[in-house]
Image (cartoon, rainbow, N blue to C red):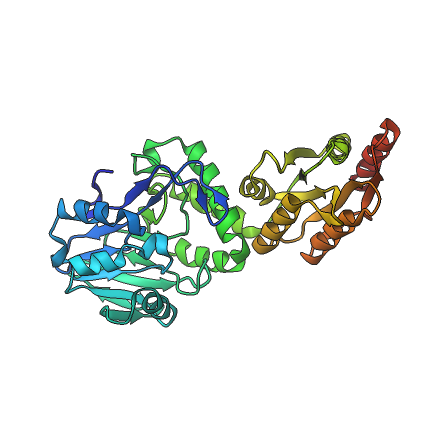
Amino acid sequence: MNVVEVKKDIYSVGAVDWNVRSFHGYSTNSGATYNAYLIMDEKITLIDTVKAPFAKELLDRIREIVEPEKIDYIISNHVEMDHSGALPQVVKAAPNATVITSDPNGMKGLSAHYGKEIKYQTVKAGDTLEIGKRTLTFVATPMLHWPDNMVTYCPEDKILFSNDAFGQHYASNMRFDTQVNLDDVYREAKKYYANILMPYGAQARKALEIVKGLDMEVIAPSHGVIWTEHIGDILEKYEEFAGGGTKKKACIVYDSMWHSTEKMAFAVVEGFSKAGVGAHLYDLKDNHISDIMTDLLDAEYIAVGSPTLNSQMMPTVAGFLCYMKGLAPKKRKAIAFGSYGWGGQSIKQVYEALEGMGCQMLLDPIRQMYIPTDEDLKQVEETITSIIE
């Protein structure tokens, strides 16, 4: 990735990770970027670093502009290693630099990862840093999505270095929203929010209120493209994401051994169809849980089906429900269904897992012994249609 000037004397110097396909169990089929920004002022300032394997790339790009040993400040908006992994190498190349991090959690996190020998300076919400012609202001955004998170705002250039907010795992050799397919970017922004930030909707709403009060011409996130002409659009989408509202649609998620639960899943889809509700069917053998959660971000209904295997639900279903529980979608209406040969414990387990997440259970567990007949499937359809209507 070439060095790109974002604003006069502000450069994008991060790295593109074309080949990464997994991030904490979230599929990143579009790759990722680790964005870092160099500000050339009286005090030369680097905002964030990159994932450790890309440290040399970062330093090489910085050297296109200035020798790293001239860097005065390194601002760490976030401790997580895709942001801070290269920090030891950068500090070695810039031995006189002071690392700016949030008080107290940034300091705790960085010193735990990289030791206390680094020269740190902590900041709190509202603190500022004079670097010459520019003043950088720090805004705390705790639990969006770690306790240490903060964003950095430069009023002179009207640019917000927004950390994880408004980002996307999206690899491209283009840096700006005006240079890429926006449908792809918005899809990845939704996926990023659904799989990383969804549990922190309250914190996201607070951060949005602060961000909306800033005079911005650029939002420069830590992942994905830089927002320039479509700032209003991504803010609007984040308001939708963080608002927790749902659309009248359903996600039907299942696994099946010998197609009996699969047949029930198709009947559930038909039941929603007859009630006029759009539904999407996800076989866990063929669909990644992070893509399902992206759809579930704004879905009103969730139906989960599993056969019984060794007195338990299928491992794929258990894994999905564990992942869903961690992301904590609120106020979903849910249905549990499945087939069995003799014990049938799985269906109740799915029901209890959904109920334990706070879902509104619309029906008792729908259980089918052995292979469902056409009449059985028709009954499933009619039951779903009736309860939805």
Residue farthest along the top direction in this orientation: 374
x and y, in percent, of residue 73 in the image: 20, 62
Q: As drawn, is 313 to the left or to the right of 330?
A: right
User: Can residue 174 be seen here?
Assistant: yes
User: Can residue 11 be seen here?
Assistant: no
At horizontal 11% and vertical 52% (from top left) the residue drawn is 67
At horizontal 81% and vertical 46% (from top left) the residue drawn is 344
x and y, in percent, of residue 154 in the image: 27, 56
- Count of numbered tags: 0
x and y, in percent, of residue 173 in the image: 29, 34
At horizontal 75% and vertical 41% (from top left) the residue drawn is 307
Examine the image and state in which quarter residue 357 appears.
Answer: bottom right
Residue 284 in the image: above or below residue 107: above
Q: As drawn, is 178 to the left or to the right of 281?
A: left
- Towards the viewer: 221 or 63: 63
Residue 318 in the image: above or below residue 259: below
Is the C terminus in the top left, top right, bottom left or bottom right quadrant? Answer: top right
Residue farthest along the right direction in this orientation: 375
Is the N terminus in the top left, top right, bottom left or bottom right quadrant? Answer: top left
Q: As drawn, is 73 to the left or to the right of 291?
A: left
x and y, in percent, of residue 369 in the image: 85, 39
Examine the image and state in which quarter residue 209 appears.
Answer: bottom left
Examine the image and state in which quarter residue 104 appears.
Answer: bottom left
At horizontal 28% and vertical 43% (from top left) the residue drawn is 15
